[in-house]
Amino acid sequence: MKNSNLVYSTDVGRIGSKESSLSTNAQSTSIIALKLDTKARKGKVVTIASGFNLSQIEIKSVMRQLKKKCSTGGTVKNNSIELQGNFIKSVKSELTRQNFNVKIIN
């Protein structure tokens, strides 16, 4: 039997650094709005980041990085990232590190 370098991945595209695959022009021109929301969630807090000018695949990649950083669950809805819990400071620092313009909305 031959040695094979084939590795199975469920991700789409090339295997490598996902951060480098995001376009910096789209990141620097859009303003990402961060807010906390409790409506229709039985009083539970959700951090919402909206205003992304990225494809669904790129938004999901950013969501995975934010979920890992905050150690929480989350989803993508209507081009917005929703994270379970109050993570405004962590999300702002991570998105700023990724060259997004971030604004906190009350």
Image (spheres, grey):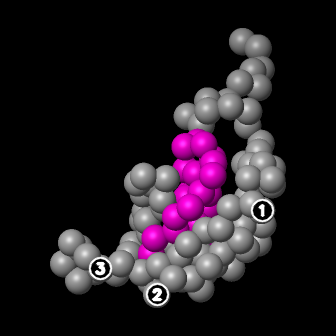
SS for callout 3: loop
Q: Tell me the number on the disc at residue 60.
A: none
Q: Position of residue 88 (x, y in %)?
A: 54, 82
Q: Tell me the number on the disc at residue 38.
A: 3
Residue 61 in view here: no
Determine which residue is flagged by label 2: 106
**Count of numbered badges drawn on the protein:** 3
Q: What is the three-letter code of the residue carrying label 2?
A: Asn
Instruction: Specify which label sits upstream in the sequence, 1 or 3.
Output: 1
Pick whichever, 71 or 81, lies toward us.
Answer: 81
In the rendered structure, are the residues bearing label 3 and label 2 in contact, judged by CB atoms less than 8 Å apart?
A: no
Q: Tell me the number on the disc at residue 28.
A: 1
Q: Position of residue 91 (x, y in %)?
A: 59, 75
Mark 3 and mark 2: span between their CA atoms? 12 Å
Q: What is the three-letter code of the residue carrying label 1?
A: Ser
Compared to residue 25, the image places residue 66 above or below, namely: below
SS for callout 2: loop
Residue 103 in view here: yes
Mark 2 and mark 1: span between their CA atoms? 22 Å
Helix, strand or loop: magenta stretch: helix
- Residue at image coords 46%, 87%: 106
Q: Position of residue 2 (x, y in %)?
A: 76, 14
In the rendered structure, are the residues bearing label 2 and label 1 in contact, judged by CB atoms less than 8 Å apart?
A: no
Q: What is the three-letter code of the residue carrying label 3?
A: Thr
Q: Is residue 21 magenta?
A: no
- Which residues, given as a range, are shown in magenta? 47-69
Q: Position of residue 62 (x, y in %)?
A: 61, 57
Instruction: Specify which label sits upstream in the sequence, 3 or 2.
Output: 3
Give the quadrant of residue 7.
top right
SS for callout 1: helix
Q: Is residue 62 magenta?
A: yes
